[in-house]
Image (cartoon, rainbow, N blue to C red):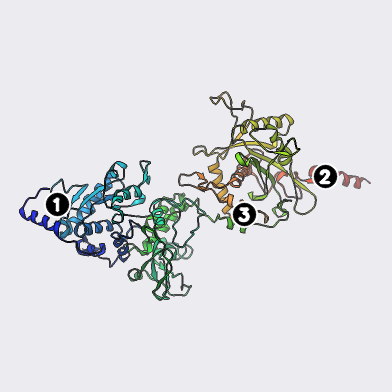
Amino acid sequence: MSYRTLEQMVVAVAEDVRPPERLSVSEAAGRYHIVKNPGQHEGAFSLAKTPYLREPMDVLTSREFTGMAFAGPARTGKSAMGINWLAHTAITNPMDMLFVQMAQHTARDWSQADLAKALRNSPELRRRLVPGRQNDNVYDKRFLSGMRAVITWPTMKNLSGKTIPYQFIFDLDRIKPQIIDKEAHVFDATRTRGKTFRHYAMCGAEGSPGFPITDANWQPATPHEAPPTEGILSLYNRGDRRRWYWPCPHCGGTFEPRFNLLQYPSAEECPDMLERAEQTYMACPHCFTADGALIEPNMQRTLNLAGRWIKEGQTWNRDGSITGVARRSDIASFWMFGPAASFSDWQGLVYRYLTALDVYEKTFDEGPLMTTVNVDQGEAYLSKQLESSRLPETLKARALDWGGSRETPCVPMMAGGGFLTATIDVQAGARKSFVVHVYLTSSGGDVWHIDMFRILKSARIDDEEERYLIDPAGYPEDWDLLIEQVIERTYPMGDGSGRRLPIKLTACDSGGEAGVTANAYAFYRRLRVAGKHKRFHLLKGSPSKTDTAPLRLTYPDAQQKDSMSAARGDVPVWLVNSNIVKDQVANMLDRRDPGGQVHFPEWAEGWLYKQLTTEIRTAKGAWENPSKRRNEAFDLLAYCVAFGRHPDIKLHTLDWSKPPGWAADWAVNDMLIMPGGISAPEAKIKRSLADLAKDLA
């Protein structure tokens, strides 16, 4: 280290021997960090506008924790915590620091802009900076106290081999992927740099939520739990989960100031979006009524000054006391929301939300909506394609009693008419079976889930005359069970008339473990020889992102490169674009009105509804089953909906005011079988002949 003057040398020696001041980070910020933002604030850093930053900053020097996570919207001032901590460390607590930005260019920009401005405007901090390019450059800052600040970006090369007790990560959710070089999570990789210092080490991170919710059916297990996402909220969930509360100025009840508490006129009351936003106020969840007291926007600062951080497990009572057992963790974690952000206003929050919502409704572009929810509101975003009421309990509550039971299911008379479709999933492994679900499609495209069962036992008999368990992959003859038990199955009408409705179309998955495809093709050929193939169709799921057809016919050909194929190009296999079809199914499950609604029988068990809500649509546009729970019901319903486009059905062009005979009203439906096994057309002819004979008599 070189010095230009004797005075610099004396000052450096004095800094080395001077005992550290006992100041908190917030106190050091108010003394040493000078801010010059014309029009906003000029002078020493002040918490007068951002009192919610005091506790997160002061935790950075606590020996009770080795991590700090702050989740919040933009315009909270949260990024200033890094510079305030640097000022405290450089002057009162000389420990090396590591500042991690999302990329090299942002590291350079922060160093040359925000940090350089703070050093330039803060005399006490600036005079402690060691001069010289080696000591004061874009990525390194050395101070007379002996402290060194390193500015970097997340790669394993940059983070490895460094032993630094203090680290701070900016804008965590903009670091993508979160797993650095496929080796470690950015927070954990950074935090490891201070492991040698044990409880003297600290890793802080801040950010606005930037990753989508991955489970549409998630419900918080505890009041302060964040949704399942990556990034800062995942880190928040690992901590003690503190949330920012306000006391109501009218009733004294405490609550979190979230966006959903903001009230503004509806579009019907006020068509102009800006005018709607200008009338925004907040409703206290405890005392608000239509004529009750309002919380006006100008109360925000006063309420922030009265606000408090409350940990998971604690309750802030009206008398000011805090009770309950707080959640414990080595990470102090904080999450606050948009209406409390000091440099934001409620009018702007609402206006940006309304304009983003308008863009979505006109173009289906969710980008602006996701941005305002994440950045302005500080909330995690649930894709509109996932946002629904598709909870198992919600679907179950819509079940109807149309007669019958699990043992004796029947066709609902209330449907008025329609046709039956059966779909089959081939289960392998320990659950070897044919899983069969049967649906009625009625006028307008409503789907009625009328039966569900598994075929478990083979017709094959062992030495003790017991039936073997079914094995669709190993025994071709086991497929023949589908003829009687599915293809030729009929269901009684719910009116007790003795009439029965047969299945018009059966669709069966042709994939699965080795052997299933070959046996499926062989079964189709046997049906064709017997003349029974026209109502049975093989399918294969194909979640293509380029093929826009929900259902497409193919003829797999063994002459192609796949020499293991059991097909000879003579077996038709329908490709179901599962992503497109499942989007439609999800919308149908959400629908509450006729015209594409899904109905369930009252006797259906809870597993059905769980399977229908297991899959989620990811941000990449694919339907996935992250929990790996059983989901056959969702797949089978998707097959039913897909085969509505089969040439024998053409549901998308079917005129329900003049339906074909096989989909007509129950009084004239051609598919119905009368008591005694006579088909409806035959019965009609007999009745006509009887009438003719009567007329001739």
Q: Which mark is residue 683?
A: 2
Q: Is residue 339 left or right of residue 77?
A: right
- For the residues labelled 2 and 3, the Cα–Cα distance comes to 41 Å
Q: Counting residues from the N terminus, which is met first, the one under dot 3 or under dot 1?
A: 1
Residue 417 location (% of width, % of height): 71, 50
SS class, disc 3:
helix
Q: Residues within 10 Å of mark 1 (few under 14, many from 20)?
A: many
Q: Secondary structure at mark 1?
A: loop
The amino acid type found where label 1 is placed reads: Val
Mark 2 neighbour class, 10 Å CA radius: few under 14, some 14 to 19, many 20 or more: some
Q: How busy is the neighbourhood of tag 3: few (under 14 within 10 Å), some, or many (20 plus)? A: few
Task: Calculate the distance from the C-alpha at mark 2 to the C-alpha at mark 1.
Answer: 102 Å
Is residue 116 found left or right of 467 in the rendered image? left
User: Mark 1 or mark 2, which is nearer the start of the sequence?
Assistant: 1
Does residue 190 sit above or below 401 in this rendering?
above
Q: Earlier in the sequence, mark 2 or mark 3?
A: 3
Residue 136 percent coordinates (x, y): 17, 49
Q: What percent of the width, then of the height, locates residue 654?
A: 65, 44
Q: Amino acid at mark 3?
A: Gly
Q: Is residue 373 visible in the rendered structure shown here?
A: no
Disc 3: which residue: 606
Place residue 660 in its image quadrant: top right
In this rendered view, identify the residue nearer to me: 133 or 199: 199
Residue 404: percent from the left, percent from the top? Answer: 73, 54
Q: Name the residue that disc number 1 marks.
A: 130
Q: State whether residue 392 appears in this view.
A: yes
> CB of mark 2 within 8 Å of CB of mark 1?
no
What residue is shown at x 68% (from left), y 40% (from top)? 505
Q: Amino acid at mark 2?
A: Ala
